[in-house]
Image (cartoon, rainbow, N blue to C red):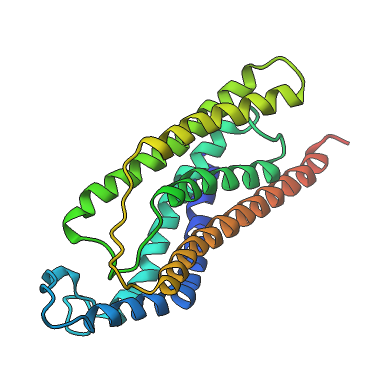
Amino acid sequence: MVRTLVVRGLLLGLLAGLFAGAFAFLAGEPHVDSAIALEEAAPAAAPAAPADDHHGEEAEVSRPVQKAGLFLATGLYGLAVGGIFGLVVAGLRGRVGPRSDTALAFAAAGTAYLAIVLLPFLKYPANPPAVGDPHTIGSRTLLYVVMVLVGLAAVAIAVAGGRRVTGGPWARWSVTVVTFLVPVVAALALLPRVDEVPAGFPATLLWEFRLASLGTQLVFWAAFGALFAWAGERAARRTAAAVPAAAPS
């Protein structure tokens, strides 16, 4: 069963990744182009950007190639995440969460979106190419990864805490919410703030890009959760239909 869930996660993750790539191409790439145009229109007196920070036609990788590579990137992301998701669902199935495979798929996808996407976004939202110091990309990436790990740890702690409560639903949910919020609030308060948006950068463009980035992840996780739930329900129907046929007359 584990192998089936992993293969299902790989295939459906790839498909969901392509859906997300299409959304990013339509909703996000225009904002990237606008940010690059602003960057290239900067005064000539401004310090020259490093060679790997150019995005135009003369860059090492041209914009048309970058746009085509977007689908490759989201597809590979979907493959990787889908395989891990299949393993996680196999571990949770029948132990934690809803008993129904369909409900478990939606619950796991929604929880993943909350922990991996929304929480890090609150502290370190995505920025377009013209925003951010190239010299701090390593530290910024590390902080983002730390926030993702905090979100995953908070979910694990909340689930474990809620399962240990012997009271009614209100007591379990209260403990679950509190144990989730404590590490999240601590991380939001203690991790250093990063603000490298240059003065004069259009606020509308910045937030439209960030919303497009958030929307791309929403499309991925919504599509993946729905596809995984549909595949699980279809498999359950086939199993239910095969049982009477295999039963002795």
Q: Furthest residue to the top?
A: 166
Q: Furthest residue to the right?
A: 249
Q: Position of residue 226 (x, y in %)?
A: 64, 56
91 vs 65, nearest the viewer: 65
Question: Residue sitting at 53 percent across and 49 percent down?
Answer: 113
Q: Position of residue 97 (x, y in %)?
A: 65, 33
- The quarter of the rendered structure image containing the C terminus is top right
Judge from the rendering whether residue 102 lies leftward or rightward of residue 7; answer left or right.
right
Judge from the rendering whether residue 114 lies leftward or rightward of residue 72; answer left or right.
right
Q: Position of residue 27 (x, y in %)?
A: 48, 75
Question: Residue sitting at 16 percent across and 76 percent down?
Answer: 60
Is the residue 172 above or below the residue 151 in the image? above
43 vs 100, nearest the viewer: 43
Q: Position of residue 84 (x, y in %)?
A: 45, 43
- The quarter of the rendered structure image containing the N terminus is top right
Question: Residue sitting at 65 percent across and 41 percent down?
Answer: 104
Judge from the rendering whether residue 103 lies leftward or rightward of residue 209; answer left or right.
right
58 vs 229, nearest the viewer: 58
Is the residue 174 above or below the residue 213 in the image? above
Residue 62, image quadrant: bottom left
Residue 70, image quadrant: bottom left
Question: Residue sitting at 54 percent across and 46 percent down?
Answer: 114
Judge from the rendering whether residue 218 lies leftward or rightward of residue 209; answer left or right.
right
Number of numbered discs visible in the structure rendering: 0
181 vs 15, nearest the viewer: 181
Q: Furthest residue to the front?
A: 199
